[in-house]
Amino acid sequence: MAAQFGKRVVKGAATTALAALAVAALSASQAPGVTDTPQGRQNANSQPSPDANADDSATGNSPYYTDLPPLNSPTPSPSASSDTPGVAGDAEAGIPATVLDAYKKAETSLAGSKPGCNLPWQLLAAIGKVESGQARGGKVDANGTTITPILGPVLNGVGFARITDTDGGAYDGDTTHDRAVGPMQFIPSTWEWSGRDGNGDGKKDPNNIYDAALAAGHYLCRFNWDLSTSADLRRAILSYNNSTDYLNTVLSWLEYYRKGTHEVPDGTGSLPSNRSDSGTGSGTGNGGTNSGPTSTPSTPPSNQNPGGTTKPKPPSTTPPTTTPPTTPPATTPPASPSPTPTETVDHLEDAGTGKLTATAGDTFAEKISARTETKAGKAVAKVRVRFTITGDTDTTFTGGESVATVVTNASGVATAPALKAGEKTGGFKVRATVVGRTVSGLDYAATVTARQADALARTADTALTCVPGGEFADLVEVKATYKGAVADGVAATATLIKAADDAAENDKGPYFKDADGKTVRTLAGLKTGTDGLLKLPKLYADDTAGTYLLRITTTGGATLTVELKVAAAAS
């Protein structure tokens, strides 16, 4: 359940104070990104990052659990477990077995796919604790799916943000508004692009802890963030839920879990009891507000005196006055909620995107920009625009994702992250759509060209000679460059040609051997290494003496012709 979207329901100042005290107490082995002053207050480093927009978070900034870890360090104990809400001490360090397994598997997966992110599983555990109390104390089945759905409040603008339905109720069962879903509390529009299959069952289910944990890991690792640095760790957490209190609470649990934890049986984890929307949030509800009813003290009747005895009412001698009937006041129909920025969008316009082309492996110099506008052509700010890469391509956005969601700025413009070209050449498209609004999308054509070289040179200047029927002692090695820089991964072809003005393959003289030892005089599919070098296999000579030519060509037009001599040894 995560922090409230937009304007929050008022909550007690005690939460912030307790968070500050907890972080100060944990400062002996401080989590990155949190510092404390002598007064125990958080410094400016814990404030929301300017690039963490409240309208663009994993959870829609819905409510979260505010319970803080105990101030004492956990002492891992296999027997320490509890099913009692709010239990402190060793029980708080216990994480349900399946939930803990999902966090660790997600860490292992991200270590392979995005090693530079340095995602610790304890961060997923901290977020899982704050979002859903570790899937309500580990109430999941054998596959990791929650026994009952975990849904955040209806995001209808009453106490929370207003997010109209984006998934047709597919994830949250609500066809009018969106709700955060599952143990890691993803809103449907975020899950649509960030969802992952973490347990290999072929589905991406936000209610499955393996899928949700892996998706959360990828979400936290986008934009090439390195979570071993305090700045990127802070940005990542705030992008999940843009709240300073949320940041401090997650960091407190992160540090607590880093000090030690243990697994407990599924369904026996301790449950949090306090939420950011002032609800009790025992973990058994559906994420709605759980505030208790408010009682109004009764007012004593006006004919009672302070002593409690009733005064007799004297008989009236004045005839009652007849009051003419009055016209009931006109009732004012409830005002319709103001439309959200998204609901005012009529169309998308290109915001000046240039030609999108890049060489394989390079970053596109041009970024895609789209502008959201009303019917009258007025720019609309704070609208989520989703950019999706389509087509047969391995090009991604920076960070390795094929989808990126960006919130429009004050000028109504959303600029996608830079495109990183893969190795597949050819064209593809990037489609821009408005999240939560059915308007025509925009398609941007992009092209990846093959790696090129414009120059080739031998790395040695020794003569290449051989006796008839022998083999050349030296291997041919060349270096490829493009505009003076190393040209790596460039496709090349080497052919023994008939003459300088005849590029046809020769039928005599030097030759290469294939894997079966057969004679070949053309090698295709060659590629320069990361250093731009290309080393050819050993050359052999038949019995025909003479001077021969080896021609090497690359994508981009670079050509080098090497002279080979076959002659009898001098007497």
Image (cartoon, helix red, strand yellow):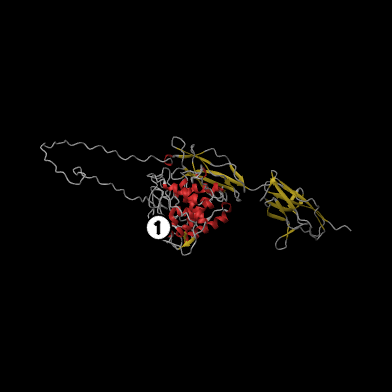
Q: Position of residue 172 (x, y in %)?
A: 41, 52
Q: Amino acid at mark 1?
A: Pro
Residue 475 sits above or below residue 405 on the image: below
Q: Position of residue 340 (x, y in %)?
A: 41, 41
Q: Nearer the viewer, residue 489 or 41?
A: 41
Residue found at the far bottom of this picture: 79
- Badge 1 local density, few (<14 within 10 Å), some, or many (20+)? some
Q: Position of residue 529 (x, y in %)?
A: 68, 52
518 relative to 7 in the view: left or right = right
Quarter of the image containing the C terminus? bottom right
508 relative to 109 in the view: left or right = right
| Residue 449 visible, this orientation | yes
Q: Nearer the viewer, residue 61 or 149?
A: 61
Q: How many marks?
A: 1
Residue found at the far front of this picture: 307
Q: Nearer the viewer, residue 409 or 502?
A: 409
| Residue 61 visible, this orientation | no
Which residue is depicted at the point 57% across and 56% down? Answer: 111
515 relative to 288 in the view: left or right = right
Residue located beneath label 1 in the image? 85
Q: Position of residue 148 (x, y in %)?
A: 40, 58
Judged from the image, the secondary structure of the residue bearing numbered disc 1 is loop
Q: Nearer the viewer, residue 261 or 490?
A: 261
